Image: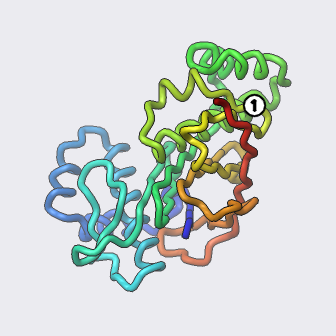
């Protein structure tokens, strides 16, 4: 089981924040009140609400009974029973959630026209990736940068390996990853979500062979269980020793 959904909570119904707050545990409320940034509070509430609703749609558990850790939750439970592993990603008002039986990681990033993507790549990417990006047309540079970044961020979340190390040591070029053998059980699916948004999902223990694509949804509201279909495609593996 590997499922994902994404959304922009700027389009949600006006009462969603109060709905989310009513579902928080005491520990989550304490965590919320410690946050100084209004944006961070809003992201926190949106992520918690979407996870609870998404879990409720897949399991026989009401949203108010879904338990999450107050800080960096990696799984959801109900009545003390483990339901699923989870991963959450925010980028401005955009949000993605993935749930699955095994460990997983998701990353959702937006394209910002004013950013110097090549300069960022030169400061943190593998030399082979930088060389490859330098050869890309300016019109697709942001897209190609974010395809690499989201893949490695999702891998870091799933594997627990340090993101900084993954950024500099494992090249991912033109839909081919060169992950070392120790990461052979991790598989990545990724794709563009509309215009200027990119999503990557990494799973551990996927079916063998892993599916070529994964279908998810884009929601217009947190409780829009049907949504519109989103498809991510698996990238090929070229293992290093």
Residue 48 appears at what percent x and percent y? 35, 61
Residue ID for mark 1: 173
Image quadrant in which you'd find residue 174: top right
Label 1: few (<14), some or many (≥20) within 10 Å?
some
Q: Is residue 42 left or right of residue 80?
A: right
Identify whether 160 is placed above or below 232.
above
For image coordinates 80% across by 31% down, the residue present is: 140
Q: Secondary structure at mark 1?
A: strand
Residue 234 appears at what percent x and percent y? 72, 52
Residue 135 appears at what percent x and percent y? 84, 19
Identify whether 234 is placed above or below 26.
above
For image coordinates 16% across by 57% down, the residue present is: 27
Question: As rendered, which of 205 and 221 lies closer to the eye?
Answer: 205
For image coordinates 47% across by 79% down, the residue present is: 57
The colour mode here is rainbow
For image coordinates 26% across by 49% down, the residue present is: 71
Q: Is residue 1 left or right of residue 39?
A: right
Question: As rendered, which of 154 and 236 lies closer to the eye?
Answer: 236
Q: What is the count of numbered marks? A: 1
Considering every residue shown, the one lying at the far bottom of the view is: 60
Q: Locate the C terminus and report the quarter of the image it occupies.
A: top right
Identify whether 37 is placed above or below 7.
above
Q: Locate the N terminus and report the quarter of the image it occupies.
A: bottom right
Residue 59 appears at what percent x and percent y? 42, 81
């Amino acid at each position: 089981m590997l499922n994902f959904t994404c959304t922009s909570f700027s389009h949600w119904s006006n009462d969603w924040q109060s709905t989310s707050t009513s579902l928080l545990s005491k520990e989550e409320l304490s965590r919320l009140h410690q946050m100084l940034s209004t944006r961070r509070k809003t992201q926190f509430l949106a992520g918690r609400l979407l996870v609870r609703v998404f879990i409720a749609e897949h399991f026989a558990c009401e949203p108010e009974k879904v338990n999450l850790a107050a800080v960096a939750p990696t799984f959801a439970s109900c009545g003390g029973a483990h339901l699923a592993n989870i991963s959450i990603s925010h980028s401005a008002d955009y949000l993605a959630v993935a749930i699955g039986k095994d460990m997983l990681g998701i990353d959702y990033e937006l394209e910002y026209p004013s950013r110097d993507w090549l300069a960022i790549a030169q400061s943190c990417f593998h030399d082979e990736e930088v060389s490859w990006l330098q050869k890309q047309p300016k019109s697709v540079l942001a897209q190609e940068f974010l395809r690499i970044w989201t893949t490695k961020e999702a891998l870091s979340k799933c594997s627990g390996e340090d993101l900084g190390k993954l950024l500099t040591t494992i090249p991912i070029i033109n839909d081919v990853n060169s992950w070392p053998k120790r990461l052979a059980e991790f598989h990545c699916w990724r794709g563009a979500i509309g215009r200027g948004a990119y999503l990557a999902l990494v799973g551990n223990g996927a079916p063998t062979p892993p599916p070529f694509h994964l279908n998810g949804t884009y929601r217009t509201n947190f409780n829009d269980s049907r949504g519109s279909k989103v498809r991510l495609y698996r990238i090929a593996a070229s293992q290093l020793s």
